[in-house]
Amino acid sequence: MRTGVALWGYGKVPLPENVAFFAGAHFHAGSILGTDVWKHDEDTVRRFVTLLELHDVALTVHHKLPDPEDPEAPESFRREIDLIRTWHDRHGVLTGLTFDAPGDKARLMPHLRRVLEAFRDTDVFICCEDFPLNEEQHRILDGLDDAFPNLGVLIDLGHLNMRVTVEDPEQDRAGAVRRHIRAVPLPIRELHVHNNDGVSDQHRHLLEGTLPVDAAGAALREVGFDGISTLEFMPEWSNVRGREAYDLALASRDLWENALGPGP
């Protein structure tokens, strides 16, 4: 298992500087947005990749499947996936590629297949965020997981906290979190780890909010989770800046690793 950080939460600091800090603080993974693959100059990318390799930091890229309602989106998405694949071929540091999956999931499956085929000959894992969550949603994949063994799922624990609150605000929240995690039908390759009040998607640090952190860690141990935990704390959403943002990321990391315990 590796604990990492969503580097887009610290976007005012250059990527190489953030990687150097978090690697020095014993984080072992980092995540960037799909747009980061093509927006940075060559010198920034070279320094970023060098630091990833030097510190053995796993890299995931988080992107978005195209909006089914936008007729121009599929072609743009095709070009973006080609760019990400070319970037991976050039630098060889990509461990996982994950996607937000908006709208009608069945209409997104051709685009997910396109990604899976583009990375079929690699070890890069492919995941949608919060899909599939159960056997009913699993059927929408129509066998893609059998055809492509690198397909998994990314579970966002902040979103999970909101789902169990909406279902029944008076319920045993810890028990509900455990049930939801047990119901996930594919291997959980990555987590987005953050906290909230159970009502809105606040992306707080783990020390503030209603997520039953220990129960989530225990359930993930139970299902054999052995992937990447990406802390998706967004400091500026909580008016946290500067050194305090990094200190809270480290405190969240320590709390999460204690809850998750040793790997399987």
Image (cartoon, helix red, strand yellow):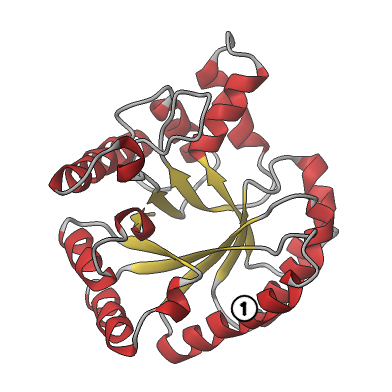
- The spot of residue 94 in percent (x, y) is 45, 75
Residue assigned mark 1: 81
- The spot of residue 3 in percent (x, y) is 34, 52
Residue that appears at 45% across and 77% down = 37
- The spot of residue 202 in percent (x, y) is 44, 35
Classify 29 as above or below 248: below
Outermost top residue: 170
Q: Which of 14 and 140 is in front in this view?
A: 14
Which of the 4 image quadrants contains residue 148? bottom right
Q: Is residue 112 toward the left or the right of residue 142 in the image?
A: left
What is the quadrant of the N terminus in the image? bottom left
Residue that appears at 54% across and 80% down = 84
Residue that appears at 33% across and 89% down = 42
Residue that appears at 36% across and 45% down = 234
Instruction: Say which amino acid is labelled 1.
Output: Ile
The residue carrying pointer 1 sits among few (fewer than 14), some (14 to 19) or many (20 or more) residues within 10 Å by Cα, namely: some
Which of the 4 image quadrants contains residue 213? top left
Q: Would residue 205 be visible to someone looking at this image? A: no
For label 1, the SS is: helix
